[in-house]
Amino acid sequence: MGERTPLAAEDVAARLAERDGWSGDTTGITKSFAIDFQTGTHLIGDVALIAKELEHHPDVELHWAETGFSMTTYTAGGVVTELDFKLADAIDAIADR
């Protein structure tokens, strides 16, 4: 199974259950971080570097006290794939620093 192979609903649900704060379904996954605007800009910049390496880019929302990320694999038809969870793990690792 490749990184861009669609995941079954059971797989998405199981993987989301293993991750703190992530939610979604087979069409996309999301997480928001309660952080200030300046910290959010730094988080987005660091995530952008990893996204470029993975050739997989999240949708981003930046607000005064919250920064959010949403992912789906558009090249697989707008479904969740291994690549989405790979990026989710990278985002969590960056946010934990």
Image: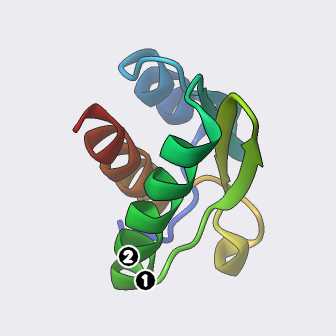
Q: Total label count?
A: 2
Q: Horizontal and vertical percent for residue 71? A: 64, 54
CB contact under 8 Å: marks 2 and 1: yes
Image quadrant for the C terminus? top left
The residue carrying pointer 1 sits among few (fewer than 14), some (14 to 19) or many (20 or more) residues within 10 Å by Cα, namely: few
Side (left or right) of 9 relative to 10: right
From the image, tell me which residue sits under label 2: 49
Amino acid tagged 1: Lys
Looking at the image, residue 82 lies above or below residue 63: below
Query: From where the camera sits, is residue 27 visible?
Result: no
Judging depth in this view, the residue of 95 and 53 nearest the camera is 95
Q: Which residue is outermost to the front?
A: 38
> Which residue is found at the position 66% from the left and 41% from the top?
68
Judging depth in this view, the residue of 5 and 51 nearest the camera is 51
From the image, tell me which residue sits under label 1: 52
Query: From where the camera sits, is residue 32 visible?
Result: yes
> Which residue is found at the position 62% from the left and 62% from the top?
58
Q: CA distance from mark 2 to mark 1?
A: 5 Å
Q: Horizontal and vertical percent for residue 74? A: 72, 73
- Helix, strand or loop at label 1? It is helix
